[in-house]
Amino acid sequence: MLVRTLRVVADVFPERALTVDEVKEIEGAFGAARLLALADGEDAGVAYTLADPSKRERNAAFGMVIVRPEHRRKGIGAALLDAATAWARETGFSGWETSIKSDDEESLAWVQRRGFAETGRELRLELDLARVEPPTIDPPDGVEIVTWAERPELARGLYEVHSEASRDIPGEEDQPLESFENWLKHDMGGPGDKPEATFVALVDGDVVGFSKFSLTEAQPTVAFHDLTGVRRAWRGRGIGGALKRTQIAWAKERGYERLSTMNEERNEPIRKLNERYGYRPVPGRIFVRGPVA
């Protein structure tokens, strides 16, 4: 059934496509439920729900309901939502969170009628690598950029950057920090997290910033930006820009066609950084939270 549900996801939302092995690793680590709806013998829709550690402070599970366009308005989505949120309730969660494309007003209205309320928005930006030349990396004086694969002992320094930078993302200020061990496993050790695609800025051997890609074999021509963070004391010196140029050059050299990133709407510094390097907006995401069934 997993293969069939992933096919529905890839057909309706190709930007969310993952491989079977990637999904097994993610869902196996956290606990999850995956549901498939059939209509007249066809795979009409899918729902999945995940005990995402990043939502535990809000006592919420995270999931999606996806129905093929030709099978909508038949009650399939409502039945899938009921089943997915029932799993969340039975697992001990009091809320269920999901995201909707920012240009999908119909789906937003659909969840609002079911008691869901907006909690935040993310802008989606993309860079067409065919339209740009490989940039000169040229880090600031005294700054060295290496990959995490070259310096695996830097993990603790990466965590310290994450601890500062993640708290400065609008809407995340009050989120509790994961332990180093959980962060290393869940944020840096997933199937799409590659040490060779994680770039570290060093000053005198100390980590002052890093940026990383999330990669998937299901979308081999697209590299997805994950966190780009610089320690507060080192911001405003061009380190973030040097890390961004490193990522663009790395992806271009390896034949990627497109870079994709999500930015919280209020995160002005990273928005301006991406716009400076030619990233252009495409429909983003609206986050909503609602009751469990």
Image (cartoon, rainbow, N blue to C red):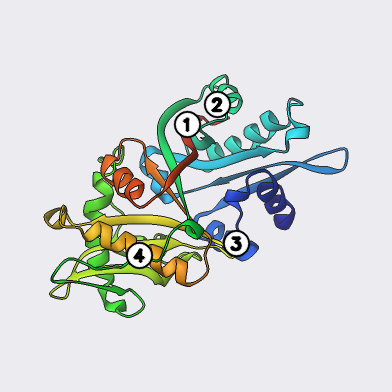
Front residue of 157 and 202: 202
Q: Residue at x 64, y 32 (%)?
A: 82
Q: Which residue is mark 3?
A: 24
Q: Can residue 94 be seen in this snapshot?
A: no
**What amino acid is found at the position of numbered circle 1 in the picture?**
Val
Asked if residue 140 lies left or right of residue 31, the reply is left
- Marks 2,1: beta carbons within 8 A: yes
Q: Which residue is mark 4?
A: 135
Quarter of the image with the C terminus is top right
**Disc 2 vs disc 3: which is toward the camera?**
2
**Quarter of the image where one finds residue 134:** bottom left
Question: Which of the two labelled residues, at mark 2 and mark 1, occupies the earlier sequence position?
Answer: 2
Question: Which of the two labelled residues, at mark 1 and mark 3, occupies the earlier sequence position?
Answer: 3
Where is 54 relative to 185, above or below? above
Q: Secondary structure at mark 1?
A: strand
CA separation in Å, label 2 and label 1: 9 Å
- Marks 4,3: beta carbons within 8 A: no
Q: Which mark is residue 288?
A: 1
Q: Residue at x 41, y 43 (%)?
A: 55
Q: Which residue is mark 2?
A: 108
**What amino acid is found at the position of numbered circle 4 in the picture?**
Pro
